[in-house]
Image (cartoon, rainbow, N blue to C red):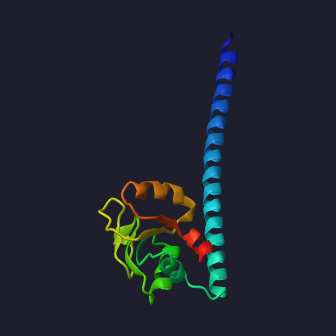
């Protein structure tokens, strides 16, 4: 093989390898964007349902009372978790604590603990990050014996 042919072959191989790498990186970015889009759609639909529940004159405390959940914990203290705290603030439902991976950096009206801490017994744990419910439920089931409920289920069953 001639010296020039080897050089051109190496250049072509390098270009192909670069294109494959760039394609993989673009694919990962697209996948991440799709996950974030799906997560935000789930959040939008959840909040839309919450508004519909409020427009019907219903309150989430009714769900907890009807199911005998007097003491709960909330998993996830972002927007939905804070709204749930506010929704239950003047009710007889006791929010014993919240669980969040950023427990050290969140200020809230309720005590916040990390998942790896000892979790006190409660009647139920309400999970607010609905997009990741299955993963969170699996982790909590290893630690707790109480029902683990998605806030989405609460909103559709109240």
Asked if residue 105 lies left or right of residue 44, the reply is left
Q: Nearer the viewer, residue 131 or 92?
A: 92
Coordinates of residue 119 in the picture (x, y in percent): 32, 65
Residue appearing at x 45%, y 72% in the figure: 77
Residue appearing at x 60%, y 73% in the figure: 157
Quadrant (top left/top right/bottom left/bottom right) for the C terminus? bottom right
Q: What is the quadrant of residue 116 in the picture? A: bottom left
Kindly tell me whether residue 75 is visible in this rendering.
no
Quadrant (top left/top right/bottom left/bottom right) for the N terminus? top right
Whether residue 136 is situated above or below residue 125 in the rendered picture: above
Residue appearing at x 53%, y 60% in the figure: 133
Which residue ends up furthest to the top in the rendered image?
1
Coordinates of residue 153 in the picture (x, y in percent): 58, 69
Q: Nearer the viewer, residue 29 or 40?
A: 40
Asked if residue 59 lies left or right of residue 93, the reply is right
Residue appearing at x 69%, y 27% in the figure: 12
Coordinates of residue 66 in the picture (x, y in percent): 51, 79
Kindly tell me whether residue 58 is visible in this rendering.
yes
Q: What is the quadrant of residue 101 in the picture? A: bottom left
Coordinates of residue 121 in the picture (x, y in percent): 33, 68
Whether residue 67 is situated above or below residue 15 in the rendered picture: below
């Amino acid at each position: 093989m001639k010296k020039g042919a080897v050089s051109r072959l190496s250049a072509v191989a390098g270009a192909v390898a670069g294109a494959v790498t760039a394609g993989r990186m673009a694919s990962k970015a697209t996948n991440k964007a799709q996950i974030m889009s799906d997560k935000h759609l789930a959040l939008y639909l959840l909040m839309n349902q919450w508004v519909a529940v409020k427009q019907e004159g219903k309150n989430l405390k009714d769900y907890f009372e009807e199911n005998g959940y007097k003491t709960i914990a909330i998993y996830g203290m972002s927007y939905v978790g804070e709204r749930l705290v506010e929704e239950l603030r003047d009710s007889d439902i006791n929010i014993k604590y919240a669980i969040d991976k950023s427990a050290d950096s969140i200020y809230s009206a309720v005590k916040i603990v990390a998942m790896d801490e000892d979790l006190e017994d409660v009647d139920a744990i309400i999970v607010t990050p609905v997009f990741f419910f299955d993963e969170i439920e699996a982790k909590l089931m290893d630690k707790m014996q109480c029902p683990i409920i998605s806030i989405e289920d609460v909103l559709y069953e109240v």
